[in-house]
Amino acid sequence: MNFAQIILPLNLKGTFTYKIPADFKDKIEVGMRVLVSFRGKKIYTGIVFQFHDEEPEGFLPKDIISLLDDAAIMPQSQMQFWQWLSEYYLCNLGEIYRFSFPASLKLESETYLKLKPNVSVAFENLDVHEMHLIHALEVRQLINVTEIEAFIPKKEIVKTIKSLIDLQYIEIDEKIAETYKAKEVAYLRLKNPAEIRASLPEILLSLKRSPRQQELLLSILEHETEFAGIPLKKSQFLDQGNFGTAPLKTLISKNWVEEYFMQKDRIELYDGETESREQLTPEQQIATKEIETAFAQNQNVLLHGVTSSGKTHVYLEIIEQTVSAGRTVLFLLPEISLTKQIVQRLEKKYGRQLGFYHQKLSDFERVEVWRKVRNGEIKVLVGTRNALFLPYSDLGLIVVDEEHDSAYKPREVSPFFNARDAALMLANFYGGRAILGSATPSVESYYLALKNKIAHVKLKNRFGNISLPVIQIINFKEAQDSKKSVGNFSLGVTDEIKKQIDRHKQTMILHNRRGYSNVIECESCGYVNYCSNCDVVMTFHKFSNEMKCHYCGQKAAKPKACPRCNSANLNLRGVGVEQIHEEISRLLPDAEVDRMDVDSMRKKFAYEKLYEKIEEGETDVLVGTQMISKGLDFENIELVAIPKADSLLYVQDFRAEERAYQLITQVSGRAGRVSGEGKVMIQTYNPEHPVFKLIAEHDSTEVYTHLLAERQKFHYPPFVKLIMIEIKHRREDKADRCSQFLGSVLRKYLPEECILGPEKSPIAKLNLLYQYQIWLKLPRKNYAEYKSLVMKSLDEVEDIPAYKSVKKLIFVDF
């Protein structure tokens, strides 16, 4: 064990070899943080990935400078997971490291140095650079690497630091370099309670000219007498008694009162009483037994239950069994907006053993959860996709709720991976099992169950045998032709909403498009307002009276006249959720109409406030985007209307039909969850479309038969493996040439029928970058071989100096 492979937080291929100094060999472990120099100029915090004894060829490896941990902070199972993620999704380990670690657990880029305590320096043995650094540290006590560049040449910095560390003259100041600080809360108590009580008359007499000090001292004494053992929080005590800090400082200076600090969690944990599990229905008991049998046979499970069938109750039963066996559970959710509701349901079961983890937590809050998971204090963790990377000691179960949701595989943040598939592998590395749960499983998961790769457990009935909602398909073309429509609504829909309001019931209206209008168009010359950064038309938002690009976030004022011909004849084209909200408010002036979309939920606690309003029955109609299809469980919602259902189908995506089915079914499941009298009204110009007809029949088997037949016919997943390569550059000609060259290289190694493109992306320019893409449809057989040829092709392109500046993003299974 002479060399270590180190992962650095850089988006560079592979790991980096460093020599292990003799005095580190008995201490260093895989998963430990180390300090290393890179390219002679910078110092980074790396993670030890593996060891070996083979002397590298062609270069002399540098020594590891310092160990930053006493023991490994990343379990071996997590390191195996990182390696699989890197190989399968063709991403770099450095990307995974940067994504998975909270920033406060990584040393800052400015690494600090200091002299060792009581060190005696033999200056006669130092070179000029070493002497300069020692003298600087004698004056400054602490100095960072960037500041050293002022008096030592860059190429000599690492050598100088390494030499002085080896001589044991200086050391890394880890406490300052690591940014995380535990939250401390100030408390008050008497310094010597027995002595103060014995001499209280004399003390009060000495304070006769300071009545506020007398009152403060007596108040502290009264608290300790009445509430013995309960800490007295300083801020709360001073506020309640209206005391200033001056009398407190005096009492502290006289050694009668002392201030002390205790660490406190930044995340408030549940301290109430825990409750026992709810009684399962016979169908849920059967499903639980089937899951237990599958787990005993080392199979993961697809829990396929209709909306409101009580999948969560089944989850809770399996979670309880896992926790009772002493193992940890990860409950994955696609979005943060669902976290609060699930936590409320789980915290009464598991109290302080429950934690949650998502990207909206502050960095310090994430560090606290990270450390509690590592120490085994949290037994059930609710989180989004980044919770997969926490250092679990014994992960026994992963539940992936709403496993079909596209939020599990976003394209905005690297590394690009599907959290659902990653969860299956992570569970395997820990020797645990996974449950994929959904009322509308992804086609890929359904196909795995069909092929018996995972167990298929079904819940066919709603909880309490409540009936599924009645689906009514409305031919909107006929409604318009017969004058039975107003704006975007048929009279049948508006009449039904009025009936629900009269019955004091609630309605949800789904329209999955943000803003008020898709485009503002000049009727004289046809001009439309494009985003200057992207090749997309800007959306008009009436509430803020501005144009917005939903891709880069650019904003512009609404034009008063056409910028091209100066005509004032500007028309709104297309319908957004704001327009639907305005229209229904106008049609139903006495109704309380609310909106739920990304734009209306930006304010802090906006989601919680609206949730409470709906729960209290103060909202009559809720208009929203796909947000309303997730997690809303209210007893008074009995009608769901989808006024422009066709817009869900006409999308440039081979998954359009699947996602339309999932979204419509999910939002339909919000209706009649208690009464069983739910109704769903779908307006469409194409009522004979197979997706709409099958949704109305509640026949999921036929839906998946239809979708799988389409996928097989046109060679799409799950029958082939799909890789998309995106090429981006500020210059269109360079992006084009690079994509054409990559396409020609791929054609050297892959069959022609496997390659689609290169061609411009559907959005040709995004955030000032021109985009081209190549789609690869690779046979499942020999997929590993094909994938290695793809990487070989990319390496050949990367070797061309002219194309090094071109971004090449790889999306696997997207």
Image (cartoon, helix red, strand yellow):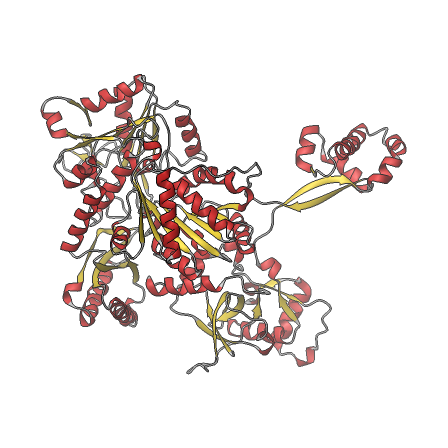
Q: Is residue 706 left or right of residue 432?
A: left
Q: Nearer the viewer, residue 441 or 540?
A: 441
Specify the quadrant that holds the C terminus: bottom left
Q: In this view, which residue lies farthest toward the left?
A: 481
Residue 580's place in the image compared with 113, above or below, is above
Q: Is residue 706 left or right of residue 318?
A: left
Residue 570 seen: yes
Q: Nearer the viewer, residue 714 or 210?
A: 714
Query: What residue appears at the point 56 percent right and 66 percent down from the top-left corner?
Result: 150
Residue 565's place in the image compared with 730, above or below, is above
Residue 642 seen: no
Query: What residue appears at the point 14 percent right and 39 percent down from the top-left corner?
Result: 689
Which quadrant of the view contains residue 607? top left
Q: Position of residue 407 (x, y in %)?
A: 34, 47
Query: What residue appears at the point 25 percent right and 44 percent down from the top-left corner?
Result: 659
Q: Position of residue 176 (x, y in %)?
A: 61, 58
Q: Nearer the viewer, residue 647 or 662?
A: 662
Residue 371's place in the image compared with 515, above or below, is below
Q: Position of residue 257 (x, y in %)?
A: 78, 40
How many marks overall? 0
Which quadrant of the view contains residue 173? bottom right
Q: Is residue 461 left or right of residue 237?
A: left
Q: Position of residue 772 (x, y in %)?
A: 23, 57
